[in-house]
Amino acid sequence: MSAPRSSPTPAPASCKSMLTRSVSVHGVDFVHRQLGPQDGVPLIFLNHLAAVLDNWDPRVIDGLAARRRVVTFDNRGVGASGGSTPDTIEAMAHDAVLFIRALGFDRVDLLGLSMGGFIAQVIAAEEPHLVRKIILAGTGPAGGPGIDKVPALTIRATLKGALTRQDPKQFLFFTDTEGGRRAGRAFLERLKERTGNRDKAISLLSFRAQLKAIHRWGLQAPADLSRIHHPALVANGESDRMVPSENTLDLAARLPQSQLVPLYPDAGHGGIFQHHAEFVSQALEFLES
């Protein structure tokens, strides 16, 4: 059960040493890591496509965990979590709620990136009393323009990465400019900082299930976002190729209590990683206001 919000006194934090734990959810083990103060409303991270525990930028985790209790976890069937990966966003959201309750939390904040932002919207709509505030980054509403094309774009980038021996996130998350390429290389290097007890990569079967779920989300009829009354911080880069940045503006316009972060310049889908210092500061201010 979550405790009252603590004072924002910085606490030592490093994702390099986060312990990997598991919790049973209806007989399925969900792996997770926690960092930061043990009181206050927990901040639950919701993963992007193909992400596992080690795909979150250490600067974002450490920056937020300096003053917030941060919880990261692998979705069902992803990384070291057990079970089979669902092929709908709604089922992923239901799993996330069960995981949150299995940890004993009755009030949480959500940070959803890309696919995680889809999941966050469903949780906020279906479990309004569980959620206090939400942060939506590099994401969009159901039926948003271009979202149904994410699977094809991802597959092309994966093939390009294999041919050029580069991580496809370089193409998908960052702009093809000198600044974007430099930011991408720096981000990928930061992901290597944790050297021990690293997570398993996503399986091909789970990857396909997530692609199917995203494609379905992109083809859905627009949802009624006016029923999500939680304070929401909406952020993205100005040149998102995966979930076109116009979706960010649409979310901010349709959510009743939204706060739009000015789109990060020369940045794409990974804008919160490229501009991690600004994002952490903006996110903490939002969560503590």
Image (spheres, helix red, strand yellow):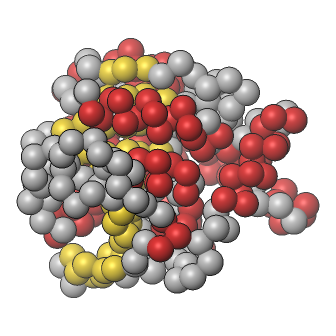
Q: Quadrant of the C terminus?
A: top left
Residue 5 image point, x, y percent: 16, 44
| Quadrant of the image occupied by residue 159 | bottom right
Q: Quadrant of the N terminus?
A: bottom left
Horizontal side of 29 relative to 181 (left or right) equals left
| Residue 152 drawn above or below residue 271 | below
Residue 242 image point, x, y percent: 63, 40
Q: Residue at x 19, y 26 (%)?
A: 229
In this orientation, does residue 146 appear?
Answer: no
Residue 276 image point, x, y percent: 57, 40
Q: Residue at x 62, y 51 (%)?
A: 151
In this orientation, does residue 134 appear?
Answer: yes
Q: Which of these two is toward me, 79 or 160?
A: 79
Q: Residue at x 45, y 80 (%)?
A: 80
Q: Which of these two is toward me, 212 or 175?
A: 175
| Residue 23 drawn above or below residue 137 | below
Q: Residue at x 18, y 46 (%)?
A: 6
| Residue 273 drawn above or below residue 282 | below
Horizontal side of 63 relative to 135 (left or right) equals right
Horizontal side of 283 relative to 152 (left or right) equals left
Residue 259 image point, x, y percent: 37, 20
Q: Which of these two is toward me, 86 or 112?
A: 112
